[in-house]
Image (tube, grey):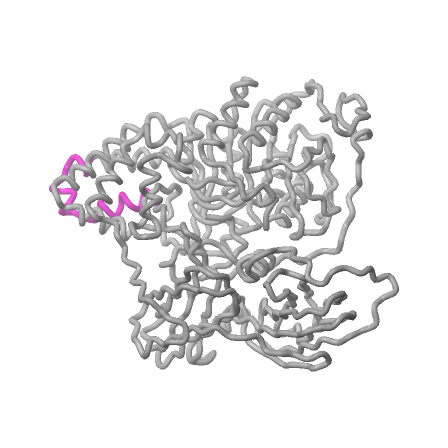
Amino acid sequence: MFKLLYFSHKNRKLKLLLIFSLIAILSFSSSNLLQKNTAIIADPEIQLILEPNAVVFDWLVMIYLDGDNNLEEFGIDDINEMELGKITGSSIAVIVMFDRILGYDTTNDDWTDTRIFNITADSDEYKMNSELLQNEGEANMGDGATLESFLDYCFTNYDADNYWLNLWDHGGGTDGLCWDDTDSSDFLTIDEMQTAIENSVTTHSVDIDLITHDACFMNMLEVAYELKDLADYFVASEESIPADGFDYEAIISALEADPTMNASALAEVIVDSYNSSYDSLYSNTALSTINLTLFDSFIPYLNYFASNLTAVLDDGIGECIEEAFFNSQMFYDDFVLDFVHFIEELFANNTLMMNYPDLNQSAINLITQLNSLIVDNYQGSAYFGNANGVTIFMPYSNSVYDSYIYDYIATVDIFTDMDWQTATLWDEFLANFYIRGFGDLSMGFDILELGVSTGTLGLTSDESHYYEINIALLGIYEIEAEIFSGDADVYLFWFNGVDFIAIGHSQLYNPEDGTIEKIRLDLIPGLFVIEVWGFSASSYDLIMEKVDPLNIAIGQTLVGSGGTQEGTVSFHYVQNLNHYYLVTLPVGYYEFTLTYDSDVVDFDLVILDVSYSLINESYSIGDVDDIELEVVTSASYIIIIYAHSGVGSFNIVVNEVTPPPSTTSTPGPTGLFNGFAILVTIIGIIAVATIYRISVKKKT
């Protein structure tokens, strides 16, 4: 559901970007901002209004960049990419509304409000040097009114022959996009997005040529249909998108080189540059272009196909549709499937097609229409040719998705006012499909109790066993699977009420890397699911226990070792195995020092209070991570040693030291982030978590 801070079963997560030194950007007061044809405004509370620009640009590029969440640093990186791609005196205007947040990235003055920039040419890949046009204060990027106001600003002040609108952030397909953490995690529903764009283009009599979503899972038929009257082309992904997103330097450079290119050509540049960026790194990435102008002619073919599927259900042989459904390509979220592949799986049932010639003909017609609708498609090798460019809503039926399916069919909650359900018969087909009991993929959840092992069980190759466990207390938990034979992996998922969020894994090569698969994380109370997956035929014994942090005294050096989330360059020793220590400190000034050999492993240091709220963290690249802390009231602290990459050993020591002369007294526990360290503090900071489909397989 979210744009990935990339953590891939098959290809491991993107290497965290280096945290660059604090770089200050020029600070402009509202009285001296340089703007075209704009009088000086003395009152900082008055919004700056640009007069209409007499210049007609070849392209106006409008980037709605929601960095008010854990993607902030990647938003800064993408703006720098845009600056690298720009040239001076060009006929391309790139206008960005960028919202930032406290705590994730401290570069570029670390402001946290929402600002509109005119992207200017700049060779510095780390420092944002673009022209500040307007400061919006703290804007809610999850509110349609903010999107509409941004478009109004662009259309009022810039004229162009062509318009490209790009929405940048986390995405969730029909769930929406652009989550704003500062504003109670508000987000744009699909209808809210449509309404905002429609209102603005109607007011200004503007036709948008291209809409793109640099956000996960957005290339769904339902989403594209909402945009069919608002643009000619739509570019998005069926799959999750790495945090680095589009290659803006390549895109803007290409547009600068040929500013008269049309929307179809620009869409092709976006897809091709995405292919070039990720194909050699990740096998499970995808991006595609939809010709929105063909949607009206496409819908009758879809409806004829859906009505013929319903006829099969009415005849009581829906099992053949269910089989095609189960065999269809799905992605990290189990609520969508590749629509073309679903039709192809139906075609594979010769008996079905022979007995239902109308269904056969409707499927042939629909494939023809989809081949025209999907004008460009890149898919990684992980999909074996089955990610054809666009998905459709069709989740598994189970306790996770049943209420979600109902909301879709009834067009309520997040689906309220969506046009798709009114215009198509797809929701009627789904209602008939699910009410007959089809699509129920039993997850096989057995109840696992803390401290009670499963006993020795067997797995066949590529088989999964699932265990459900309820955590009642905040604390540190350890999952251990002893592998007696074969090779098995262990995965931990947190259920947030709608989706399973992958938060931990152990993917050792057994027995080469050892015979104990282990995950050790701190967890909040809630429902969790453990998956044991057979990389090969295996036998195992699984247990989960609550554990205490090891006590460490002031001046005592403790030694630890282990594999990491990324493991080695050959993907050995891959696991989430944090090390926890508890230290009690009287009033004083202390230094936490973590040392290791950075040639073989990269460990990181995190300090929490006993309620698991973040106090401080260090993600240095060298051999030492060091944190200094002034304690003004005697308190206990939890130390987490998180291994980012490689495998090796470390030393951790806490020493009382002489405070520097400039030290200012501050409280010990700052309570920067309430809640759980791994799901919020650790995962949010180190870029690990993402929403996953539970059945996707892992080790290559």
Front in this rendered view, residue 394 or 348: 394
Q: Is residue 364 visible?
A: no
Front in this rendered view, residue 204 or 577: 577
Q: Is residue 486 above or below residue 292?
A: below
Front in this rendered view, residue 267 or 468: 468
Q: Is residue 587 left or right of residue 215?
A: right
| The quarter of the displayed image where residue 471 is located | bottom left
Is 359 part of what is drawn in magenta? Answer: yes
The location of residue 540, given as percent across then percent down, is 35, 77
**What residue sits 43% from the left and 75% below the top?**
480
Front in this rendered view, residue 120 or 436: 436
The location of residue 13, given as percent across then percent down, is 53, 59
**What residue sits 51% from the left and 33% below the top?**
211
**What residue sits 61% from the left and 66% below the top?**
610
- Stretch of the chain drawn in magenta: 338-361
The residue lying furthest to the right in this view is 661
Is 519 part of what is drawn in magenta? Answer: no
The residue lying furthest to the front in this view is 633
Give the position of the C terminus as an image quadrant.
bottom left
The location of residue 9, given as percent across then percent down, is 45, 61
Q: Is residue 565 left or right of residue 353?
A: right
Q: Is residue 535 visible?
A: yes
The location of residue 680, given as percent across then percent down, is 56, 57
| The quarter of the displayed image where residue 183 is located | top right
